[in-house]
Amino acid sequence: MRTTDQYEGMIAETVAVVGHNGDYINAYVARPAGPGPFPGVVLFHHRPGWDEWYKEATRRFAHHDYVAICPDLYARHGAGTPDDVAARVRAQGDVSDEQVVGDGLACVAYLRALPVSTGKVAVMGSCSGGRHAYLAACHAGADIDAVIDLWGGRVVMAADELTDKYPVAPIDLTERLASPLLGLFGEDDKSPSPAQVAQHEAELQRLGKTYEFHNYAGAGHGFFYYDRPAAYRAEQAVDGWSKIWDFLDRTLR
């Protein structure tokens, strides 16, 4: 923790990253000023899009001495407000798992190539981004050092939910997970429901994976989102962030 007499500075900007299939996509990067080296975090944004909350969260990681990147997973659908772009994406059946994982792993490589990087990188996301972070970790194996799933829906999926864009339920890839996992969930959530969280946990236990799940009473979906008053739960969010910092200190520092 910094003391009040220490210098603080931050660099935050939009960059271009070569993502899945060689496509250039925008990404928001924030890092502390100075030579580092710093561990890295890739943030997978939620279904509402590449919005202000996610850019602020990216800067929050930089404040805590991480270099963080949040790619625009909807970049191929044109420009506009986050709400407008997200609506276009939903109208087209969302983005494919293959594309999102490709973009995310490109950002992992981008962070590792930075001269200020320690080489250790975690992935994190909430809502659909939690699912995507988990998928990326299962595909990357030991190439990702830690994964944080914040109430990621559709990790557990029924057979009739699978499509060309979602060909495999993430829970069915759990055997390939090689990094420690932190999961934060609300007991009032419906996607994932407490039963789905319990099913996921049982699979992690069966396969001997390193993980920790925390389930919050009185919280539903999106309880970190201060900009969504109906969802936000201050006490649970403060505790959840403290668990994130502790987990990353143990896995990336």
Image: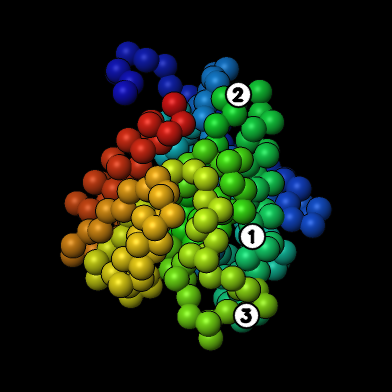
Q: Nearer the viewer, mark 3 or mark 2?
A: 3
The amino acid marked with disc number 1 is Val
Q: Residue at x 27, y 53 (%)?
A: 214
Q: Is residue 192 above or below residue 121?
A: below
**How far from the left and from the top, in percent, is residue 217?**
18, 62
Q: Residue furthest right?
A: 22
The amino acid marked with disc number 2 is Val
Would you say the residues marked 1 and 3 are in contact, meaning their CB atoms lie under 8 Å apart?
no
Residue 234 vs residue 64: left or right? left
- Image quarter hosting the N terminus: top left
Q: Is residue 188 above or below residue 25?
A: below
Residue 116, numbered label: 2
**How far from the left and from the top, in percent, is residue 138?**
56, 54
Which of marks 3 and 1 precedes in the sequence? Answer: 1
**How far from the left and from the top, in percent, is residue 100?**
64, 60
Q: Residue at x 40, y 61 (%)?
A: 203
Residue 136, numbered label: none
Residue 100, numbered label: 1
Q: Residue at x 25, y 46 (%)?
A: 238
Pick the residue in front: 206 or 103: 206
CA–CA distance in space, label 1 to label 3: 15 Å
Pick the residue in front: 83 or 107: 107
The amino acid marked with disc number 3 is Thr
CA–CA distance in space, label 3 to label 2: 40 Å
Label 1 environment density (alpha carbons within 10 Å; few <14, some 14–19, many ≥20): many
**How far from the left and from the top, in percent, is residue 179?**
49, 43
Q: Nearer the viewer, mark 1 or mark 3?
A: 3
